[in-house]
């Protein structure tokens, strides 16, 4: 009985230690990605592509980004260039596939979708310490023979996600959450499969989007150009 009590005490102590050190876990992860170096980069031009599994198509994409909140996305499809942009105040787009090259404003809700590229660059771990977000140590999980620290993240809307952090490198690996719509619940995963180093910071090069365990989309960030001049007019609707 003493042996089992000792094992229980050691197990409980280990969990308590991790729960008390969530601050250390998150700060180590932020340090591993070198957020300080990433924050110093004011502009990005990212050349890449988006693979849509259902269609089996690889679509070229260029992201033009200027801190703190300007984004222009250029999508090449069927010989046309589709543009989505946010100029810091309004979102707009032009889509020649609709039969018109008119540049039209988008609803406010489109802003979050366009600015999602910042979430990809920063990863969810950088929300640590931000007002309205809370984090809690959950435990460990093994995926493909690698050990990951799992952390619960609750955002400003009380939506809960699970963050996976590589136990060895402290790099962010995956965000998993559930999205409910009507009577249906879907498991959503953003898996940061591959990473690269840009100006000392660790940034994603491949992000896989899975729904209910199936790959539906893969974002490839092949080439990063950083620190160049991007005038505000690049993001403004002409």
Image (cartoon, helix red, strand yellow):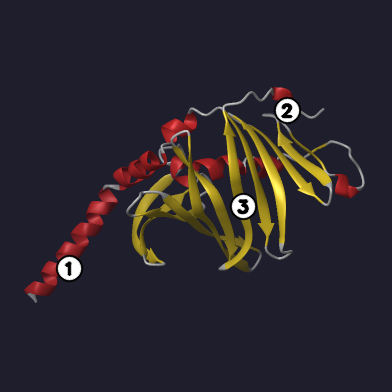
Residue lying at 48% horizontally and 27% vertically, measured from the top left = 40
Closer to the camera in the image, 143 or 111: 143
Of the residues under marks 2 and 1, which one precedes in the sequence? Answer: 1
Mark 1 sits on what residue? 8
Of labels 1 and 3, earlier in sequence is 1
Q: Secondary structure at mark 2?
A: helix
Confirm or deny contact between disc 1 and disc 3 (CB under 8 A). Answer: no
Density class for disc 2 (Cα within 10 Å; few <14, some 14-19, many ≥20) is some
Q: Mark 2 highlights which residue?
A: 234
Could you give the CA–CA distance between mark 3 and mark 2, rounded to whole angstroms? 23 Å
Position of the C terminus, as image quadrant, is top right
Placement of 215 over or under 119, stated as above or below: below
Whole-angstrom CA distance, mark 2 to mark 1, is 61 Å
Determine which quarter of the picture holds residue 67. Answer: top right
Which residue in the structure is indicated by mark 3?
Answer: 219
The foreground one among 152 and 97 is 97
Q: Is residue 119 above or below residue 4?
A: above
Residue count near mark 3 (Cα–Cα under 10 Å), binned few <14, some 14–19, many ≥20 = many
Please determine whether, in this image, residue 211 is positioned above or below residue 81: below
Are the residues flagged by discs 2 and 1 in contact, CB closer than 8 Å? no
92 relative to 121 in the view: left or right: right
Secondary structure of residue under mark 1:
helix
């Amino acid at each position: 009985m003493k042996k089992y009590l000792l094992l229980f005490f050691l197990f409980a102590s280990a969990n308590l230690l991790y729960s008390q050190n969530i601050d250390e876990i998150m700060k180590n992860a932020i340090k591993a990605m070198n957020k300080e170096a990433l924050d110093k980069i004011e502009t990005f031009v990212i050349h890449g592509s988006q693979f849509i599994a259902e269609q089996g198509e690889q679509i070229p994409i260029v992201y033009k980004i200027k801190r703190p909140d300007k984004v222009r996305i250029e999508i090449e499809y069927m010989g046309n260039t589709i543009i989505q942009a946010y100029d810091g105040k309004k979102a707009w787009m032009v889509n020649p596939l609709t039969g018109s090259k008119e540049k039209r404003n988008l609803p406010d809700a489109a802003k979050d979708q366009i600015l999602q590229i910042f979430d990809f660059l920063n990863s969810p771990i950088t929300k640590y310490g931000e007002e309205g977000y809370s984090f809690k140590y959950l435990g460990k999980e093994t995926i493909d023979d690698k050990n990951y620290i799992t952390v619960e993240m609750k955002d400003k809307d009380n939506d809960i996600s699970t963050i996976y952090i590589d136990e060895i490198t402290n790099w962010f690996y995956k965000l998993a959450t559930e999205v409910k719509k009507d009577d249906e619940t879907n498991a959503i995963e953003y898996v940061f499969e591959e990473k690269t180093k840009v100006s000392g910071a660790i940034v994603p090069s491949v992000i896989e989007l899975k729904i209910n365990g199936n790959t539906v989309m893969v974002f490839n960030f092949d080439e990063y150009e950083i620190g160049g001049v991007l005038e505000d007019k690049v993001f403004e609707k002409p």
